[in-house]
Image (cartoon, rainbow, N blue to C red):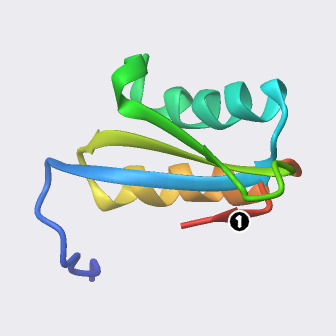
C-alpha cells in the first residue's frame, strides 16, 4: 500500500538547506538537488546569510514530480556532512 501525499504533483517545491557560509557549501547544496532534477536556473536558487555571517541558507525551488523524488533528495541532503539542517 502506498502512502498518500498531501501534495499534488507536479508542483513547485522549495528545498532549504543550512550550512557554513562557504562557496563550497553553496555549490554543494545546489549540486545535491541537481543530481535529482537536472540543471537548476540561477533564478531558482536563493541564498541568505545569517546575521553573524557564519552560516547561509540555500533554497532551491524545483518542480517536484513525485513524493519519491522529494524523499530521495532529502535523503541525500540530510546525509551530507556539510548540510547542518534541511527543511
How busy is the neighbourhood of tag 1: few (under 14 within 10 Å), some, or many (20 plus)?
A: few
Of residue 32 and residue 24, the one placed in the foreground of this image is 24
Residue 23, image quadrant: top right
Q: Is residue 80 left or right of residue 69?
A: right
Q: Residue furthest front?
A: 51
Residue 43 place in picture, x, y as percent: 35, 24
Of residue 42 and residue 77, the one placed in the foreground of this image is 42
Of residue 75 and residue 62, the one placed in the foreground of this image is 62
The residue sitting at 74% across, 59% down in the picture is 51
Which residue is tagged 1?
85
Number of dots carrying numbers: 1
Residue 70, image quadrant: bottom left
Q: Secondary structure at mark 1?
A: strand
Q: Is residue 29 left or right of residue 71?
A: right
Q: Is residue 40 visible?
A: no
The residue sitting at 53% across, 36% down in the picture is 33
Above/below status of 52 relative to 59: below
Above/below status of 10 relative to 34: below
The residue sitting at 70% across, 32% down in the picture is 26
Where the N terminus falls, by quadrant?
A: bottom left
The residue sitting at 23% across, 75% down in the picture is 5
Residue 10 place in picture, x, y as percent: 14, 47
Residue 84 place in picture, x, y as percent: 80, 61
Of residue 74 and residue 27, the one placed in the foreground of this image is 27
Q: Is residue 42 visible?
A: yes
Above/below status of 36 relative to 65: above
Amino acid at each position: 500500500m502506498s502512502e498518500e501525499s498531501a501534495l499534488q504533483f507536479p508542483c513547485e517545491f522549495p528545498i532549504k538547506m543550512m550550512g557554513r557560509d562557504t562557496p563550497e557549501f553553496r555549490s554543494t547544496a545546489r549540486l545535491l538537488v541537481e543530481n535529482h532534477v537536472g540543471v537548476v536556473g540561477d533564478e531558482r536558487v536563493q541564498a541568505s546569510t545569517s546575521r553573524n555571517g557564519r552560516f547561509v541558507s540555500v533554497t532551491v525551488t524545483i518542480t517536484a514530480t513525485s513524493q519519491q523524488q522529494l524523499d530521495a533528495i532529502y535523503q541525500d541532503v540530510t546525509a551530507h556532512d556539510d548540510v547542518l539542517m534541511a527543511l
